[in-house]
Amino acid sequence: MAASLRLRGAASGLRYWSRRQQPAVASLATVCSRSMASKTPVGFIGVGNMGNPMAKNLMKHGYPLIIYDVFPDACKEFLDAGEQVVSSPADVAEKADRIITMLPTSINAIEAYSGANGILKKVKKGSLLIDSSTIDPMVSKELAKEVEKMGAVFMDAPVSGGVGAARSGNLTFMVGGVEEEFAAAQELLGCMGSNVVHCGAIGTGQAAKICNNLLLAISMIGTAEAMNLGIRLGLDPKLLAKILNMSSGRCWSSDTYNPVPGVMDGVPSANNYQGGFGTTLMAKASVFLL
């Protein structure tokens, strides 16, 4: 991929949608026929820790799904629930004109879109392809170019909130792509998130996610160090967390995702650190800062 790619078009400014306010809906002339409450099948590729609950929230909103994952066992509960499970991303593209991908790395995303059995092998003209993976913004821009050649639309829409927010449908989506397609993307993303923000052109969603991850990494490391220091000095961890969360040290890592076992329920630290945003993925995401 050409590292010299330039961001096409100026940022269109911040466009924001939240369940707490009325969505800004595009004019009828710009709303694609596939969008606006059309309960035709939606493709979902990657049903791991994050993708699984995200796909389930689409099901709860009445969308039939076309599911693919490289690990067949991950698809079993969707098959048992009556959803279609197929054998490749290309098969997803053949059956659905709206597809969401949620994959671990840039390499996985490239393979899902451009591989031998990738989406682009059978994508339909006019399809909307939304990538919620956290990947290199340059990869998003390159994928968008390839998708555009096929007459389809690509948007990058990485998420924040972790597994808990994915389960409850309260993710934040940071969306990059043409503004005219935002309403069509918002229809689906609003089923999985409480905040859907249009950040600008392709790649700006990933840019926002990188900035968020930088701050998250700093605050999580700081919270872990502060908690460990307090424990070594004889403080009860629950009491220390309570004090931090009523003081100036309060942050998401301390009050929502505390890394110390026994302080909070329903977070990875309460489940032997299973199901969270692991250090491997954080390190992968942090590489994009270099």
Image: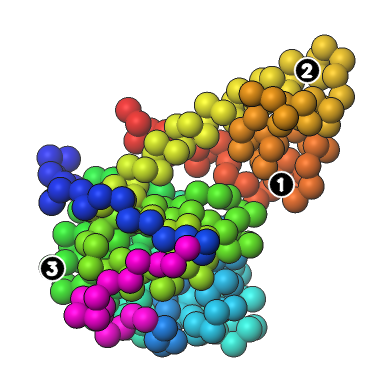
Residue pictured at 81% horizontal, 14% vertical: 232
User: Looking at the image, is mark 2 or mark 3 nearer the viewer?
Assistant: 2
Q: Residue at x 40, y 44 (%)?
A: 209
Contact (CB < 8 A) between labels 2 and 1?
Answer: no
Which residue corresponds to mark 2? 230
Question: Label 3: few (<14), some or many (≥20) within 10 Å?
Answer: few
Q: Does 132 sit above or below residue 189?
A: above
Q: Nearer the viewer, residue 233 or 115?
A: 233
- What SS does tag 2 mark? helix
Residue 130: image location, x then y, percent: 35, 65
Looking at the picture, does residue 181 appear above or below residue 231? below
Q: Which residues are magenta?
A: 21-36
Is 149 part of what is drawn in magenta?
Answer: no
Quarter placement of the C terminus: top left
Q: Looking at numbered disc 1 in the image, what kind of residue is underneath it?
A: Val
Q: Looking at the picture, how far across and down is residue 42, in whole percent?
A: 42, 79
Does label 2 or label 3 sit earlier along the sequence? 3
Question: What residue is drawn where x is 27% and y is 85%?
Answer: 33
**Amino acid bearing label 3:** Lys
- Return the mark for residue 267: 1
Question: What secondary structure do most residues of the magenta stretch adopt?
Answer: loop
**Residue pointed to by mark 3:** 149
